[in-house]
Amino acid sequence: MNYGEIKNCDIADGIGVRVSLFVSGCTHCCEGCFNKMTWDFGYGKLFNAETENELLEMLSPDYIDGLTLLGGEPMEPDNQRALVPFLRRVREKFPTKSIWCYTGCVLEKHLLAESHWRCECTDEMLSMIDVLVDGEFILARRNISLAFRGSDNQRIVDLKKTLSGSETVLIDFD
């Protein structure tokens, strides 16, 4: 897996001060995407042990609230396979820090049901994520007044509550 960018002290992509990893590779190709260059799976730098260690170091200060995964598309199967071992390390070292993930996938349609997006590590990846911002960006539904998302079809899902219950639990910041 490659990544396009790492942001330290990011306050735009989740609650609090975060470390954000922008992975490369996305087959959604949403019209109006703000990060079009990350559609290319070969864009950016190789995500390796050195990158993981750098991210863990950035996550270590007490004022950092957690990690955010964006893209590109973190839920592309090849990206999931690279991210799951890293997320295990994050959870082990920082069990109280939150993990947010932005995806163009819709949880119930693409990640919990059989689809191109589900692979052998999807369930484990979802189990380590606290908040999932799901749904493709739709330019015609763009709304810059929304918290933590770009178009009004996108949802902010409390993934821990959703996976432990029988219905999807949304978080409303607006």
Image (cartoon, rainbow, N blue to C red):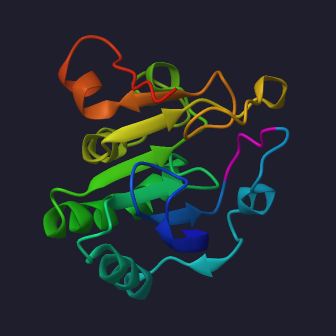
Position of 144 with respect to 120 (left or right) is right
Main secondary structure type of the part rendered in magenta: loop
Q: Nearer the viewer, residue 146 or 100?
A: 146
As drawn, the residue found furthest toward the top would be: 166
Q: Is residue 142 above or below residue 18?
A: above
The image position of residue 35, as x and y in percent, is 74, 56
Q: Quadrant of the N terminus?
A: bottom right
Residue farthest toward the bottom in the current orientation of the protein: 50
**In the rendered image, which quarter is residue 44 located in?**
bottom right
Above or below, comparing residue 152 to residue 84 in the picture: above
> x, y (%) of residue 172?
44, 24
> Which region shows up in magenta?
26-30
- Residue 118 at least partly seen: no
Q: Nearer the viewer, residue 3 or 144?
A: 144
Residue drawn at point x = 23 percent, y = 68 percent: 89
Horizontal side of residue 26 vs 142, given as left or right: left
Direction from residue 148 to residue 99 in the image, left or right = left
Q: Position of residue 75 (x, y in %)?
A: 50, 46
Where residue 125 appears, x then y in whole percent?
33, 47
| Number of numbered callouts drawn | 0
Query: Is residue 137 a member of the stretch shown in magenta?
Result: no
The answer to whether residue 106 is seen in the rendering is yes
Q: Residue at x 45, y 47 (%)?
A: 101
Relative to 79, does residue 137 appear above or below in the rendering? above
